Image (cartoon, grey):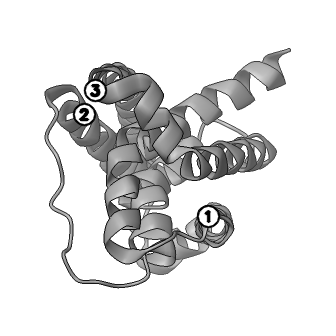
Amino acid sequence: MEFVLNVLTVFLTLFAVIDMPGNVPLVIRLRKENGEIETAKSTIVATIIMVSILFIGDVIFKLLGLQVFHFALAGAMLLLYFGVRMVLGIESEASDEPMPPSIFPIAFPIIAGPGTLSTIISLNQDFSTLTIVIAIIANSIAIFAFLKSADWIQRKLGKVGLTIMERVFGIILIAIGMKILINALVLSINYANSMIG
C-alpha cells in the first residue's frame, strides 16, 4: 500500500510540474503553426530524457562535486517559481520560428524541461528508483493521452476550465516545492553537522 501511495505521490508531483493541462493551448497553437505533432515521438523522447537523468544524475553530481541536497534546493526553488507562475497565470514567451515541434519544444523543454528534470533528481532523495520510473512511465501515458486529445480537452473544458485546472496544479506545485525545500534544508544541516563533527 505504501509503495502505491509513493508512486501516486511521485506521479502527481511530476504531473503538476509537467502541467500538460496548462500546456494544452500551447500544444494546439504549435499544431496550427507547424503542422501535426508526432505524439508518439514526443512522448518517447521525453520519457528517455527523464529516465536518463534519473540514472545519470548521481554521476553528474560526482563530476561537479555536488550533493543531492544542492540540486534538491535548486529544484525546490524552480517548483516554487513554476507554481507561482501557474497560480498567477504568467505565460512563457513562445518562439515564432517555424520548426517541427515534436521534439523541440514539445519533448524538450515543455515536457522534460529544467523543472521536470530538477524534480526527478530531487525526488530521488525521498523515493526509490523503481517508484520514480513507474511514475515517469505513468506520466508518459498521460502525456500521450493529452497530446492526442488536446483539441477535445480544450473544447470540453473551455478557457475557464483550463485556467482553473492550471491554478489548482500551481497551488499543489507550491506545496510540493515547500516540502522538498524543507527536506533539502534538513539534509544540508545534517551534512554541515557531519562535516563539522
At a point 41% along the width and 24% down the height, the residue shown is 157
Which is nearer the eye, 191 or 80? 80
Q: Which mark is residue 147?
A: none
The quarter of the image holding the C terminus is top left
Q: Secondary structure at mark 3?
A: helix
Q: Which residue is mark 3?
A: 163
Q: Is residue 160 visible?
A: yes
Structural distance between the alpha carbons of marks 3 and 1: 23 Å
Amino acid type of disc 1? Thr
Structural distance between the alpha carbons of marks 2 and 3: 9 Å
Amino acid type of disc 2? Met
Q: Which residue is mark 1?
A: 39
Q: Secondary structure at mark 2?
A: helix
Q: Which mark is residue 86?
A: 2
10 Å crowding of disc 3: few (<14), some (14-19), many (20+)? some
Tell how many labels. Answer: 3
Q: Position of residue 91 (x, y in %)?
A: 17, 47
At a point 20% along the width and 65% down the height, the residue shown is 94
Q: Is 152 positioned to the left or the right of 5 in the image? A: left
